[in-house]
Amino acid sequence: MDFVTESGYFPPKAIEIARKKPSWRTEQEVLALCNLLQALDSYRNYSEPMQLLLAKVIRFERFGRRRVIVKKGQRGNSLYFIYLGRVAVTEDEDGSSAFLDLHPMVLCKGDSFGDIGLLNSSVGRATVVCMEETEFLVVDREDFLAHKLDHEVKRDAQHRFGYFRKMDLFRSWSDEKLWKLVTLGKVEKYSYGQLISKDIFESSSIIFVCRGSCEVLRLINLWSSPSYHKWIWQHLALVDDRLLESHLKEPPSVDRFKKFQVKSYPAQDFSSLKLLRLQKAWEQLGTSFSRKINTSENSLPKTLGPKIKSKRPHLISCRMFNTRNGDIPKEAVVGAYMNIRTVEEGEVIGLHQILLPENQQDTRPLILASLGTKVIRVRKEKFCELLDSEVTEKLSEFQIEYPSDEDLCQKFLMENSWNIFRKDLLRLLVKPRQLPPFTPFRTKKKDVYNPKSLVLNLCSFNKAKDYPIFMAPQKYLPPVRIVQAIRAPQYKIQEVLPQYKNAGVLV
């Protein structure tokens, strides 16, 4: 309870430890500070030995609004971790432009700055000013060098240099030029499921995956796809047969002819014809066949159509949403995240369109999510300054074409149909356990994850929902509900599967 605080401020007990001299701090106090600082992303990016060394020498500072932390043109003497508040990075000396600019470059909790000036005593190229009351954890140059933290930093830099040297893209670069790229890179670690970039296209960085993997996700609006619009009304027609003709556009002539063929020649059961032919063949061979076959007019052939019975029809009355493909129920206006590419170790993100003109670039928002990864982030404009003719030629061949939203929608519908069929088949073939497994009693929490919220059930429109609906922001559009599956009205699987009495004989 000593490290409990309110409103996200640095705990008083931790402030007391951070104000001690490094030599006065006990090992237990250093470990307590190290555990507390795990909430900062930039701190977690360092190796474990480096984290312990930083926790031993770190000190606490709190500054008010408009306080200049780093001034442009002056040498940097400290490394800053932001624990609470925000700072802005500006090009002027006093930082006043940060309060006039509508969209200043802002660093928030978990970010850090000043590490480059701490290593090489370079002159600051920007001014850092507090936008509000801000709390910092500071590492000074004297403590940094006295406890040999520079050795750990150089060791990490050597690992980054080795990673870049192994890449075929930079094989022609000299060591001096490659070290410039190392100094421009910033190492970041992300746990499983953590967001790396909200939009790869608008990102100002190039990301090198040096460990683990990540996935490129696309948020597709299913309701804007013609395939989804047609699929919705085809399944709702099982509930109300009049819906299909009133909402779908006139099908092409080829589809109408195929539909006529299906109606004219429905699926039929020719088992009786098969047995009759077997009887005649055996009679010609002199073999007796004891089973009598009914060849009356009403039994040969039997159609399988009447065996299929849909659910009891009822009219659908719900609010509609107007799309460019026509109206669909408002409940069916949903979106889904689709994995369109998995980025493995050694691959790069952000280079596939760097040489293309703007009119040829794919500007769709693509999300980058971690599967447990460590990356090196480099700003695009700094990377472009290092490009030469040989690397440019290699980049011209480095092109990635992502599938269209319509293709992604069709893939989602195919996978969704298979998943629903598979679950129904398992429920039919696998006998349920007589006794349910023991589950300990747990009190229900409000507004927590519920798997029902990620499934759209077309059979339960206008029903009250007692679970939270997950929404995702869209660019220039209102938020859309996110789903992972759609349960549509359909025939029961027992009615669709053929019935067998003897092997190979359909009756």
Image (cartoon, rainbow, N blue to C red):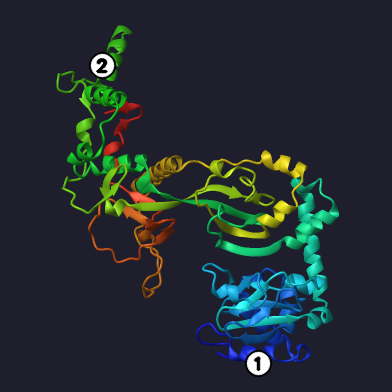
Q: Upstream in the sequence, badge 1 or badge 2?
A: 1
Residue at figure coordinates x 79%, y 83% from the top left:
143
Residue at figure coordinates x 30%, y 32% from the top left:
501
Image height of 317 relative to 411, above or below: below
Q: Quadrant of the N terminus?
A: bottom right
Lateral position of residue 470 relative to residue 83, left or right:
left
* Residue 204 lies in quadrant: bottom right
Query: Relative to the observer, which residue lies in front, 288 or 16?
Result: 16
* Amino acid of disc 2: Leu
Residue wearing tag 2: 276
Picture coordinates of residue 352, whole percent (x, y)? 62, 45
Residue at figure coordinates x 21%, y 35% from the top left:
307
Image height of 423 relative to 114, above or below: above
Secondary structure of the residue carrying tag 2 is helix
- Residue 400 in sight here: yes
Question: Which residue is outermost to the top?
Answer: 284
- Residue 110 in sight here: no
Number of numbered callouts drawn:
2
Q: Residues within 10 Å of mark 2 (few under 14, many from 20)?
A: some
Residue wearing tag 1: 16
Secondary structure of the residue carrying tag 1 is helix
* Amino acid of disc 1: Glu
Q: Which circle marks residue 285 in the picture?
A: none
Image height of 280 relative to 347, above or below: above
Picture coordinates of residue 256, whole percent (x, y)? 26, 26
For the residues carrying marks 1 and 2, which lies nearer the camera in this image?
1
